[in-house]
Image (spheres, helix red, strand yellow):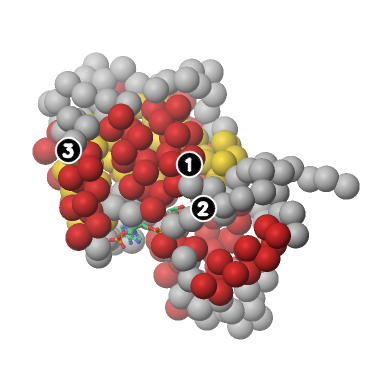
Amino acid sequence: MIEQKLALVTGGSRGIGRAICVELAKAGYAILINFNENLDAAVDTRQEIEKLGVPVDICQSDVTAKSHRDLLVEFTMERFGRIDLLVNNAGIAPKVRLDILETEEESYDQILAANLRAPYFLTQRVARRMINLIDEKSIDSAAIVNISSLRSYTTAKNYGEYCVSKAGLSMVTKLFAARLAEHGIQVFEISPGLIETDMTSDKSVRDHYNAKLAAGLAPINRWGKPKEVALAVSAIAKGHFPFSTGAVLHVDGGWHLREL
Ligand code: NAP
C-alpha cells in the first residue's frame, strides 16, 4: 500500500477530469486516471502528473459496463492498495440535441448509463472498499465527489436526457451522503456552469452560449475553466469541509442565483 492518499478520477484524461487530476496531484494525492477511448490524452495527463512527483497510472475502463467497473477498482487496489477519494467525473452529452418530444430511447439509455448508472454503481463498489479500508484502519476517512451540472436543476427542452441524468446524480449524492456518514465517508456534488472543454467546443454550442453571455447570463459573466472546477475538488480533498456532507458546490459564476 502506498503512503500517499489515492484519488480515482473517472474521465481523468481530458477536460475537467484532467484538471482535477493535476490539482489533486499538486495536493499530494497519487492518481489513477480512468479513460475510455482516448489513450493519447490519458498518456499526456499521466506525463503531466509524473512531473509533479506523485505515483500515477492510467486504466482504460468504460464505466458504463459492470465488468469494466470491477476491473477498474481491482486494478486500482492491486496497483496502489487504497482508495481515499473517488471523483465521478466521466460524462457524455447527447450526440444530437433533439426536442424532448423527439428524444430517442437509444440516446436516453446511453446518457443515463454513463451519467447516472455508472456513478451510482461505481460509488457503491468503491464505498464498500473504503468501508473495509477504514474498518481495518488502513485509512482514516474517505470522500466521494460527483460532478453534476447546472442541468441537474435547469431545464433545456432539447437536452432532456442529459438534464434527467444530472438531476438523478444529485440524488445519488444525497443518498450516499446519508448512507456513508456513519463510516467516515463524505459525499459532495460539484455543479459546474459553462466550462470550456471538448464537450462544449462544438461551434454551434459555443455560439449559442456566447450569445447568452453577451446578453448578461451570469453574475461572473464568462466561461469557466476546468481548473476552477478542479480547485473545488482539491479543497474537498484537502479536508477543508470536515462538518459537511451531501453539500453542493456551485462552480458556475453565480448562475444559480435568481434575480428579479
Ligand atoms: P469532456 O471534455 O468531453 O471529457 C469527458 C471525459 O469523460 C473524457 O476523459 C472521457 O474519456 C471520459 N468518458 C466519457 N465516457 C466514458 C466512459 N463510458 N467511461 C470512462 N470514461 C468516459 O467532458 P468535460 O466537459 O470535461 O465534462 C466532465 C464532466 O463535467 C461530465 O460529467 C460533464 O457532464 C460535466 N460538466 C461539464 C460541463 C461543461 O461545460 N464542460 C458543465 C457541467 C458539467 P476519453 O478521453 O477516453 O473519451
Secondary structure state at the residue bearing disc 2: loop
What residue do we see at 71% from left, 54% from top? 217
What residue do we see at 22% from left, 32% from top? 52
Q: Which mark is residue 195?
A: 2
Q: Earlier in the sequence, mark 1 or mark 2?
A: 2
Q: Amino acid at mark 2?
A: Ile
Q: Which mark is residue 50?
A: 3
Q: Which mark is residue 229?
A: 1
Note whether residue 136 is visible. Answer: no
Q: Earlier in the sequence, mark 1 or mark 3?
A: 3
* Relative image position of residue 81 (x, y in whole percent): 15, 31
Residue 163, relative to residue 31: is it above or below? below
Secondary structure state at the residue bearing disc 1: helix
What residue do we see at 31% from left, 17% from top? 140
- Ligand 1's quadrant is bottom left
Q: Residue furthest bottom?
A: 102
Q: Looking at the rendering, in which quadrant would you find the N terminus?
A: top left
